[in-house]
Image: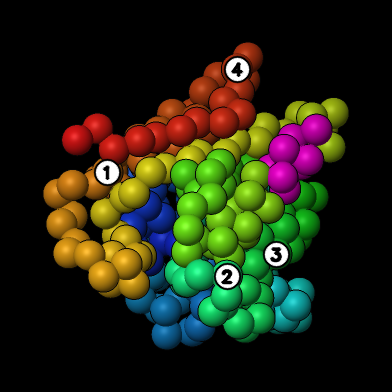
């Protein structure tokens, strides 16, 4: 039975992935930003372990984990959480830049650092849910795209560094996916939000499970998922 550490299990793609893995009987370790959120996740996924750590404060993750029990075994680390805040370069403040870089890039790097010892033992898998913005940057998307371009660099470097240890590293680049984040994006863009136009989180979850379930003779490095409508 595999053990999966998951960020972003509260909604969208992360919730779809957590539900699928929980339903098949795998062990889940779910990161929550506070104790209240941890209880919600524990109630939703009976038997799952929760860890409390705020991705918005990556400098404090070491301290937070030092007061909790980390899992002895980790087979996959799934970085799914993320935030977005749009705006033109001429209007974005350092606070907006830092918040997206910390949650979308620095926190995944810090989490990976903490769980690498367990992942090396299992010859496990690190999967990053990136974005189409991690490959192309458009007007008003500079800060978010910069964080996601950086996440691609993190994944690529990690893949080369950890290949001798048997780790697999995958980046998934979903297009616009139905989620609370997508609703926020449409609000910031001043557009009407029609969830039916975009990818169902279950479809992205299917691609993620395919990547982590592949036999050891194969590895998905990069996978782009686009809306089919």
Q: CA distance from mark 3 to mark 4?
A: 28 Å
Q: Secondary structure at mark 1?
A: loop
Q: Is residue 140 above or below residue 37?
A: above
In the rendered image, which residue does mark 4 sit on? 218
Q: Residues within 10 Å of mark 1 (few under 14, many from 20)?
A: many
**Would you name the residue on which mark 3 appears?**
106
Number of the front mark, 4 or 1: 1
- How many C-alpha atoms fall within 10 Å of the one at disc 2: few (<14), some, or many (≥20)? few
User: Gap in Å between the C-alphas at discs 3 and 1?
Assistant: 27 Å
Q: Which mark is residue 89?
A: 2
Q: Is residue 119 above or below residue 210?
A: below
Residue at 51% x, 83% y: name it.
34
Q: Earlier in the sequence, mark 1 or mark 2?
A: 2
- The local crowd at label 4, few if under 14, some if 14 to 19, many if 20 or more residues have their Cα within 10 Å, is few
Q: Circle 3 — which element? A: helix
Does residue 122 appear in this view? no
N-terminal-most mark, 3 or 2: 2
Q: Whole-percent x and y of residue 52? A: 57, 76
Residue 226 image-quadrant placement = top left
Tell me which numbered mark, 4 or 2, is placed earlier along the sequence.
2
Mark pair 3, 2: CA separation:
21 Å
- Give percent across and percent down for residue 59: 75, 77
Dot 3 or dot 4, earlier in sequence: 3
């Amino acid at each position: 039975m595999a053990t999966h550490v998951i960020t972003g299990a509260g909604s969208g793609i992360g919730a779809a992935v957590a539900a699928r893995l929980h339903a098949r009987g795998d062990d889940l370790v779910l990161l929550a930003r506070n104790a209240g959120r941890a209880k919600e996740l524990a109630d939703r996924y009976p038997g799952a372990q929760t860890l409390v750590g705020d991705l918005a404060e990556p400098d404090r993750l070491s301290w937070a984990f030092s007061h909790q029990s980390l899992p002895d075994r980790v087979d996959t680390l799934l970085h799914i959480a993320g935030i977005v805040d749009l705006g033109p370069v001429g209007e974005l403040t350092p606070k907006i830049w830092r918040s997206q870089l910390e949650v979308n890039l620095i926190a995944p790097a810090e989490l990976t650092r903490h769980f690498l010892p367990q992942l090396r033992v299992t010859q496990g898998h690190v999967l990053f849910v990136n974005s189409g913005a991690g490959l192309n940057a458009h007007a008003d998307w500079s800060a978010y795209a910069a964080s996601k371009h950086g996440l691609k660099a993190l994944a690529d470097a990690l893949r080369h560094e950890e290949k001798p240890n048997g780790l697999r590293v995958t980046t998934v680049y979903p297009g616009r996916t139905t989620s609370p984040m997508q609703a926020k994006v449409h609000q910031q863009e001043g557009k009407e939000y029609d969830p039916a136009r975009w990818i169902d989180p279950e479809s992205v979850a299917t691609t993620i499970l395919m990547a982590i379930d592949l036999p050891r003779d194969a590895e998905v490095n990069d996978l782009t998922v686009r809306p089919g409508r």
